[in-house]
Amino acid sequence: MPVLLQVALGGAIGAALRYASGGVAMRLLGSGFPYGTMFVNILGSFIMGFAAFYMLERMDGSFGRYAPFLMTGVLGGFTTFSAFSLDAVFLIERGRFLAAVIYMGGSVAFAMLALLLGMALARSLT
C-alpha cells in the first residue's frame, strides 16, 4: 500500500477514535474542562513513546514500515495540538486562568511522562 494511503487511512482511524474518546470523556466527566483532548494527547504520547522505541529501535526494521500508518496516521489523527490550543484559549477567554494553567501544564507534563513510560515499557519487553 502506498505510504500516503497508509497515512490517510491511519489518520481517519485516529480521528474517529479521538472523536469517540472525546464523547466518552464528556459523558463521564462533563464538559467544564477539556478532559477528552487532554486524555488523547496523554494516551497518544504514551503509544508514540512505545512505538518509537519498539518499532523503530528494537525491531529488525521490518515493522518500521508501519510507522507512517501508526505514528503519522493513527496517532497524528488521534492526538491534536490544535484542539489543545483552542481549548486552552477558550479557558483563558472565559477567565478560567487557573484551569488553563493546569490544563496546559498538565497536558504537556503528563504527555511527556506518558511518552517516557511508553518507551520504558517497550525497553522492558526487549
Image (spheres, grey):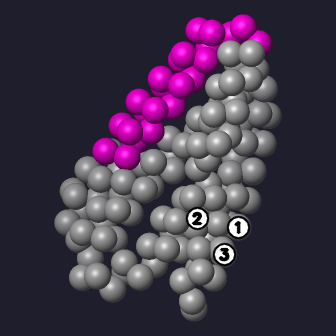
Residue 45: image location, x then y, percent: 45, 48
Q: Amino acid at mark 1?
A: Ala
- Residue placed under numbered mark 1 in the picture: 12
Q: Secondary structure at mark 1?
A: helix
Residue corresponding to mark 3: 9
| Residue for badge 2 | 74
Residue 101: x and y in percent read: 54, 16
Q: Is residue 40 visible?
A: no
Q: Which quarter of the figure is the N terminus placed in?
A: bottom right
- Mark 3: which amino acid? Leu
Quarter of the image holding residue 97?
A: top right
Question: Do labels 3 and 2 touch, CB within 8 Å?
Answer: no
Which residue is more in the foreground, 105 or 63? 105
Instruction: Tell me if residue 102 is in the magenta stretch.
Output: yes
Inspect the image, locate mark 2, and give the three-letter code of the amino acid beneath it. Val
Tags 1 and 3 touching, CB below 8 Å: yes
Q: Earlier in the sequence, mark 3 or mark 2?
A: 3
